């Protein structure tokens, strides 16, 4: 369970810049990650092994959202543009009057993925290919694809370190990434101008559902994390850092040793950008509590009924699993 922390801990990822980090360095990192995810569920990763600066990351997001609405809607999910065939990847517009006022673009791996082995009556195809605007409108597509690859690679290293910290084989969690449906999400929170009513939150309290999340947040910030005393602890932007947190699935697969911590984003009314990466298994991988595993597709579809980005479909009676009808958001 979480503790009465008053700030998020920091973990220095500098050893991962080496071609081959020493065993001792990896052991230290493993122990540090175990401690922060046991007590806080969140941490800042400083000196992450990425080729992208924060400015690089947010330039990708800003380029996408600077496109005119017509161009963005061409790649919108069919929830928002019925003539489109993409159900899971693509654009979703901001919904005025929502507590989660944001527009976003979601993409998966560029590698082709096998279809799920079990037929599903879900309206979503989790393994569908990416959909992008034309390169003339969004020339940063190759950079976005490279960012995805680097974040997936970093996630794999973190999962290996977490496994060893639990006394498990290093590949315990990384093997779940076969045909991974991890998601890179570009988010834009528009500014709230008078006479629009003041909005307290950009993103309502929630835990993430998957293995772990890596977050690039801009200097506007607003992220807050709930401690065991019921206090919302600010997690402001730290230059050059990533925020990492544990999802519900990893908390369960750690045997309850790690905690998935509730978090939210407080609104300042200012325009804001955020780029979370959700590390997720492949749809056919068996996940969950030992001895009661289910396919990941079943796990995540059971969660999606609570995600605001998919509520239109859920409310039309598409048959989600547990949690349908609750106002819970994902991402920051």
Image (spheres, rainbow, N blue to C red):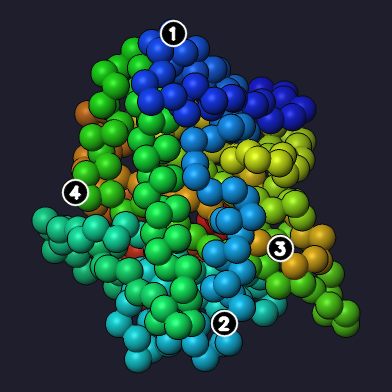
> Is label 3 in a helix, a strand or a loop?
strand
Mark whose residue sits in front, 3 or 4: 3
Measure the alpha-carbon separation of dots 1 and 3.
40 Å
Which of marks 4 and 2 precedes in the sequence?
A: 2
Mark whose residue sits in front, 1 or 3: 1
Residue drawn at the location 57% of the way across and 72% of the way down: 63
> Is 125 above or below relative to 43?
below
- Numbered label attached to residue 67: 2
Residue drawn at the location 77% of the way across and 60% of the way down: 267
Which of marks 2 and 3 precedes in the sequence?
A: 2
| Residue denoted by label 3 | 272
Relative to 119, 271 lies left or right? right
Mark whose residue sits in front, 3 or 2: 2
Dot 2 and dot 1 residues touching (CB under 8 Å) = no
Dot 4 and dot 1 residues touching (CB under 8 Å) = no
Frontmost residue, 38 versus 302 = 38
| Residue denoted by label 1 | 24
Which of marks 1 and 2 precedes in the sequence?
A: 1
> Is label 2 in a helix, a strand or a loop?
loop
Q: Residues within 10 Å of mark 2 (few under 14, many from 20)?
A: some
- Numbered label attached to residue 284: 4
Residue drawn at the location 37% of the way across and 49% of the way down: 149
Frontmost residue, 138 versus 4 = 138
Relative to 114, 241 lies left or right? right
> Is label 1 in a helix, a strand or a loop?
helix
Mark whose residue sits in front, 2 or 4: 2
Q: Is residue 303 visible?
A: no
């Amino acid at each position: 369970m979480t503790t009465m922390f008053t700030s998020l801990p920091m973990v220095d990822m500098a050893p991962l810049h080496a071609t081959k980090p020493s065993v001792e360095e990896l052991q230290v990192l493993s122990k540090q990650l175990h401690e922060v995810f046991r007590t806080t569920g969140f941490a800042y990763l400083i000196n992450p092994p990425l080729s992208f600066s924060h400015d690089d990351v947010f330039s990708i997001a800003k380029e996408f959202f600077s496109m005119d609405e017509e161009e963005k809607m061409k790649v919108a999910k069919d929830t928002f543009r019925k003539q489109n065939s993409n159900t899971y990847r693509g654009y979703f517009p901001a919904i005025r009057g929502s507590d989660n006022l944001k527009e976003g673009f979601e993409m998966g791996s560029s590698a082709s993925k096998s279809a799920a082995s079990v037929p599903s009556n879900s309206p979503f195809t989790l393994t569908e290919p990416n959909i992008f605007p034309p390169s003339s409108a969004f020339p940063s597509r190759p950079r976005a694809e490279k960012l995805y690859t680097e974040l997936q690679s970093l996630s794999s290293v973190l999962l290996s370190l977490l496994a060893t910290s639990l006394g498990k084989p290093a590949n315990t969690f990384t093997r779940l990434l076969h045909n991974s449906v991890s998601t890179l999400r570009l988010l834009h929170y528009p500014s709230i101008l008078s006479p629009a009513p003041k909005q307290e939150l950009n993103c309502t309290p929630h835990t993430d559902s998957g293995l772990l999340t890596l977050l690039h947040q801009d200097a506007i910030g607003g992220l807050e994390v709930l401690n065991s005393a019921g206090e919302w602890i600010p997690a402001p932007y730290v230059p050059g850092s990533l925020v990492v947190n544990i999802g519900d699935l990893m908390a369960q697969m750690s045997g309850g040793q790690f905690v998935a911590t509730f978090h939210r984003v407080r609104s300042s009314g200012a325009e804001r950008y955020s780029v979370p990466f959700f590390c997720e298994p492949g749809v056919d991988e068996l996940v969950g509590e030992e001895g009661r595993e289910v396919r990941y597709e079943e796990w995540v579809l059971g969660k999606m009924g609570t995600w605001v980005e998919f509520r239109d479909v859920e409310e039309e009676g598409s048959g989600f699993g547990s949690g349908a009808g609750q106002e819970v958001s994902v991402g920051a």
